[in-house]
């Protein structure tokens, strides 16, 4: 560069600043290199964050690994609630056990899909609906005990 773009004074060929006005003299290549380095750093950071997020998803089980089975949720397409058959001489509370998990506040009929998913170490049984309600649990909205 022969002259300072700001004040017009003559510059030395290797000058980084104008001696008269202090204007920073950088060639376009240096600016482009700095911009490309910034873009490269940003892309590397984005890739690293995506990799960490994927590792977290696999570790928590949100995204199953190839060797894990995925249990698809079943849908109940009927609009009618299940009806329990009770004989005339016995009430439902005397013959039916109710299941709950020690980790939730819901209780279920034994044949409910959610009751069947309770692990044996978390299974809590009740002899009556009232006992389940007295424990502070609420009826399951699927099996309607």
Image: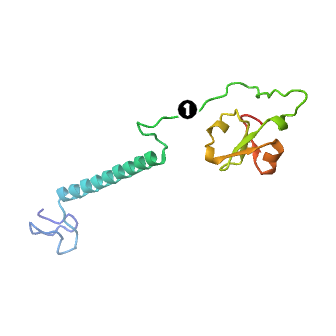
The mark tally for this picture is 1
Residue 87 vs residue 18, the one in the foreground = 87
For residue 114, say whether it is visible.
no
Eyeballing the image, is 59 above or below 74? below
Residue 140 location in percent, x, y? 73, 39
Q: Residue at x 29, y 53 (%)?
A: 39
Q: Label 1: how many residues lie within 10 Å, few (<14), some (14-19) or many (20+)?
A: few
Who is closer to the viewer here, 42 or 59?
59
Residue sticking out furthest to the bottom = 20
Q: Is residue 108 visible?
A: yes
Q: Residue furthest left?
A: 13
Q: Quadrant of residue 72?
A: top right
Q: Is 32 left, or right, of 14 in this rendering?
A: right
| In the image: residue 68, left or right of residue 134 | left
Residue placed under numbered mark 1 in the picture: 72
Residue 103 coordinates in the image, percent (x, y) = 65, 50
Q: Where is residue 65 shown, x and y percent of the image?
A: 42, 39
| Colour scheme shown | rainbow
Task: Give me the residue at 25% from left, 56% from top.
Answer: 37
Image quarter where the N terminus lies is: bottom left
- Under circle 1, the secondary element is loop
Q: Is 106 left, or right, of 119 in this rendering? A: right
Considering depth in this image, is 135 or 33 the residue closer to the camera?
135
Q: Residue at x 83, y 45 (%)?
A: 130
- Point 36% across, 51% down: residue: 46
The quadrant of the image that shows the C terminus is: top right
Where's residue 97, x and y in %? 76, 39
Q: Quadrant of residue 96?
A: top right
Whether residue 43 is situated above or below residue 97 in the rendered picture: below
Against 41, is 111 above or below? above
């Amino acid at each position: 560069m022969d002259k300072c773009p700001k004040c017009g004074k003559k510059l030395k060929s290797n000058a980084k600043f104008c001696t008269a006005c202090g204007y920073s003299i950088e060639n376009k290549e240096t600016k482009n290199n700095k911009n490309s380095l910034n873009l490269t750093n940003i892309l590397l950071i984005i890739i690293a964050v995506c990799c960490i997020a994927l590792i977290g998803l696999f570790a928590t089980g949100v995204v199953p690994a190839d060797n894990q089975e995925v249990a698809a949720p079943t849908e109940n397409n009927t609009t009618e609630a299940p009806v329990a058959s009770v004989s005339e001489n016995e009430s439902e509370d005397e013959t039916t056990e109710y299941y709950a998990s020690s980790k939730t506040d819901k209780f279920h009929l034994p044949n409910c899909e959610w009751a069947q998913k309770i692990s044996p170490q978390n299974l809590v049984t009740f002899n009556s609906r009232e006992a389940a309600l007295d424990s502070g649990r609420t009826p399951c909205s699927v099996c309607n005990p």
